[in-house]
Structures are given as structure tokens and as C-alpha cells.
């Protein structure tokens, strides 16, 4: 199998189109990293909301049990 580039410098130069190629690579990687970061932040926020809601419902149930009249 023959390599498309003779050296690492030729690979980095991308046949004279290095600026455009590496700019496109950088834009893609930045977008993907931002998407992953946003997804992680949204997941953490969603899980925090679920925990908050569950805690609230537990407090409501406890308050209702404490306010029930005791049977004699």
C-alpha cells in the first residue's frame, strides 16, 4: 500500500490547501466538542431536576402523613 503523502510536512500542507482543510477540521471538532459539552450539561441539569422533583414529592408525602388525623 502506498501512502498518499511523501512526508508529514506534505500531509500537514495538504497539497497547498492546508488552511482550508485544517480550518474545516477545526470547525468540525469544535462543533462536536460543543455538542458533547452541551449534552453533558443538559443531562446533569435534567438529572438535578428529577432529583429535586423526587425530593419535593417525598416532602409532600411526609407532610400529608404528619397531618392525617390519628384514629382512636
Image: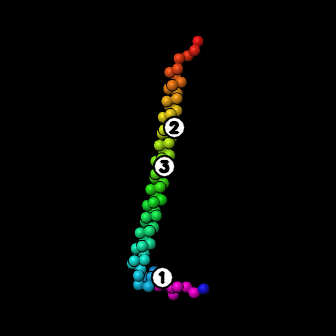
Work out whether mark 1 precedes mark 2 in sequence or the reverse, and give the earlier one. 1
Work out whether mark 1 precedes mark 3 in sequence or the reverse, and give the earlier one. 1
Which secondary structure type mostly characterizes the magenta part of the structure? loop
Magenta stretch bounds: 2-11
Given contact means CB atoms under 8 Å apart, are the residues at marks 1 and 3 in contact? no
Q: What whole-number distance in Å separates the C-alpha atoms at marks 1 and 2?
A: 55 Å
The residue most toward the top is: 72
Residue at left offset 45%, top offset 80%: 12
Residue 37, placed above or below residue 16:
above
Is residue 23 in the magenta section? no
Residue 50, placed above or below residue 4:
above
Residue at left offset 47%, top offset 85%: 10
Q: Which residue is mark 1?
A: 11
- Residue 20 relative to residue 66: left or right: left
Tell me the number on the disc at residue 44. Answer: 3
Q: Where residue 21 sits: x, y (%)?
A: 43, 77
Q: Where residue 20 sits: x, y (%)?
A: 39, 77
Q: What whole-number distance in Å separates the C-alpha atoms at marks 2 and 3?
A: 15 Å
Q: Where residue 52 sits: x, y (%)?
A: 48, 39
Helix, strand or loop status at disc 3:
helix
Tell me the number on the disc at residue 54. Answer: 2
Amino acid at each position: 500500500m502506498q501512502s498518499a503523502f511523501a512526508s508529514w510536512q506534505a500531509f500537514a500542507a495538504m497539497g497547498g490547501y492546508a488552511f482550508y482543510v485544517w480550518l474545516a477540521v477545526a470547525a468540525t471538532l469544535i462543533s462536536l466538542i460543543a455538542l458533547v459539552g452541551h449534552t453533558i450539561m443538559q443531562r446533569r441539569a435534567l438529572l438535578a431536576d428529577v432529583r429535586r422533583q423526587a425530593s419535593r414529592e417525598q416532602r409532600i408525602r411526609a407532610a400529608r402523613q404528619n397531618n392525617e388525623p390519628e384514629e382512636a
